[in-house]
């Protein structure tokens, strides 16, 4: 891999972490979906750079799939739901404030970095080490979004952010066929969640879905 490619990948790592931090605290839904699409595009660029360095067509396929599904289709679906519902913001945070969530996100990155530096015994400049750290950090930051936000549509972004973390980790630390299998499983979960949002409304919370489902099951038992 050329020095320019190494520098580009490290710059993309920083941009990916930046988009992750923005997703944690973003309240405007259109911006939230756009930031997610941008984050996915950065990951696709990393896969394309790795393809150029290794010649593995699996990496090229992953880059193309990521652009089609995560940069185009999923943000489009989420924005379509947003426009149809007329709801533009999700200001509801649970347990954490936006500032506290950012602090926790920074803490996650630090803890993952220290833990991996002890386990992997690799140089801090090693590309595989950085890819593993940022991939796991991104996955945990996605879990933080799911934990700290109320509305289901925002939790969907948390799930797809976790998937981005799994993809980034797999690009550097796992077998590529395993990554594809994991992505298929997670994509199925995401589309089920999107269907749930379509069925119950973009402003729905977990409590609303539980209440509506309980009402439906009670009616069915009659």
Image (cartoon, rainbow, N blue to C red):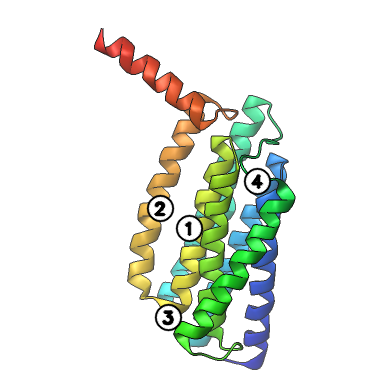
Q: Name the residue under label 1.
A: 163
N-term mark: 3 or 2: 3
Tell me, yes or no, if residue 52 can be seen here: no
Q: Say which residue appears at 56% left-offset and 63% top-offset.
A: 138
Tell me the number on the disc at residue 96: 4
According to the image, label 2 marks what residue? 186
Q: What element carries label 4?
A: loop
Mark 3–mark 4 CB contact (< 8 Å): no
Select label 2 or label 4 by which is in front: 4
Above or below, 122 relative to 197: below
Q: Is residue 89 left or right of residue 143?
A: right
Pick whichever, 17 or 53, lies toward us.
17
Disc 1 from disc 3: Cα separation: 21 Å
SS for callout 3: loop
How far is disc 1 from disc 2 in space, using C-alphas?
7 Å
Counting residues from the start of the chain, the first of labels 3 and 4 encountered is 3
Name the mark nearer the viewer: 3 or 4: 4
Choose the circle earlier in sequence order: 2 or 4: 4
Q: In which quarter of the image is residue 27?
A: top right
Residue annotated with mark 3:
56
Q: What element carries label 1?
A: helix
Asked whether the residues under the numbered discs 1 and 3 touch, taking CB atoms below 8 Å apart as contact, a structural biologist would say no
Q: Which of 209 and 156 is in front in this view?
A: 209
Crowding at label 3, few (<14), some or many (≥20) Cα neighbours within 10 Å? some
Inter-mark Cα distance, 3 to 2: 23 Å
């Amino acid at each position: 891999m050329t020095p320019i490619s190494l520098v580009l990948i490290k710059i993309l790592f920083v941009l990916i972490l930046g988009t992750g931090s923005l997703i944690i605290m973003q309240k405007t839904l259109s911006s939230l979906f756009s930031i997610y699409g941008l984050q996915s595009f950065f990951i696709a660029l990393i896969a394309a750079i790795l393809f150029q360095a290794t010649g593995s067509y699996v990496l090229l396929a992953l880059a193309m799939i990521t652009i089609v599904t995560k940069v185009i289709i999923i943000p489009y679906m989420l924005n379509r739901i947003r426009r149809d519902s007329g709801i533009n913001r999700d200001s509801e945070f649970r347990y954490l404030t936006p500032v506290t969530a950012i602090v926790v996100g920074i803490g996650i990155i630090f803890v993952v970095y220290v833990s991996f530096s002890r386990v992997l015994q690799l140089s801090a400049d090693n590309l595989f080490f950085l890819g593993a750290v940022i991939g796991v950090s991104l996955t945990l930051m996605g879990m933080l979004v799911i934990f700290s936000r109320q509305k289901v549509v925002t939790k969907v972004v948390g799930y797809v952010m976790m998937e981005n973390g799994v993809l980034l980790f797999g690009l550097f630390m796992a077998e590529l066929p395993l990554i594809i299998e994991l992505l298929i499983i997670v994509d199925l979960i995401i589309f089920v969640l999107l269907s749930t949002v379509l069925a119950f409304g973009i402003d729905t919370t977990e409590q609303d879905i539980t209440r509506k489902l309980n009402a439906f099951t009670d009616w069915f038992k009659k």
